[in-house]
Image: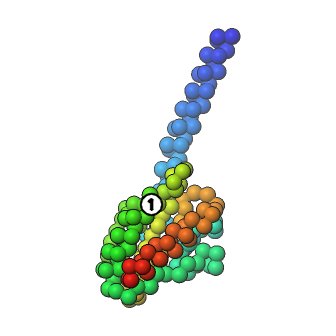
Amino acid sequence: MFRLLTEFAQRLLWSLALVIFLSLSILPAATWAYASSLGVANSHLSSCPASNNCVVSQDADSKHAIDPIAYHVDRNTARETLLKVLSVVPRTEVIEQTDDYIHALSKSRIFKFVDDVEFYFPPNESVIHLRSASRVGESDLGVNRRRMEQIRLALLDLNI
């Protein structure tokens, strides 16, 4: 009986080791592949995937479309104001910023799912184009759209 339990424990440990190894070797590649679809290319943010967990203000179908955020101040003021707003959005961290682009990560409260939140300031328009997409899953229950609309309202309250 003891020998049977020992063999079972060894097989279980080997199985766990295999799962951990595969997770560590596959997940970084999946993250890299997703990250390559971020950013601005040809003056546009990436389009949304077919899943229901993304919104974008450029070239979107009706399911994924969201309006850009218009501003009436100079571009640098709008950018700095947006950065201040992002600093108080719960569980959100700006990880990249340039003169015309901001990329932030926003994590869900309980399961810590990561959403990529992007903002693009085109040079000849007084709008902020935006994109928010979950990294995993099919549906986000409207979280990405609500987050972007809350950011829009905060910016409107600050009279940009």
Q: Position of residue 34 (x, y in %)?
A: 51, 60
Residue drawn at x 55%, y 78% is: 66
Q: Nearer the viewer, residue 29 or 137?
A: 137
Instruction: From this view, report whether residue 59 is shown above or below residue 52.
Output: below
Give the mark count: 1
Query: For this view, does 149 lie left or right of residue 101?
Result: right
Q: SS class of the residue under badge 1?
A: loop
**Quadrant assignment, res 5:** top right
Outermost residue toward the front in this view: 157
Quadrant (top left, top right, bottom left, bottom right) of the N terminus: top right
**Dot 1, how many residues are within 10 Å of its Cα: few (below 14), some (14-19), or many (20+)?**
few
Instruction: From this view, report whether residue 138 is shown above or below residue 125.
Output: above
Q: Position of residue 78 (x, y in %)?
A: 35, 80
Quadrant (top left, top right, bottom left, bottom right) of the C terminus: bottom left
Q: Position of residue 139 (x, y in %)?
A: 63, 62
Query: For this view, does 99 lie left or right of residue 23?
Result: left
Residue drawn at x 35%, y 70% is: 84
Residue drawn at x 54%, y 32% is: 17
Q: Which residue is mark 1?
A: 90
Specify the amino acid type for callout 1: Pro
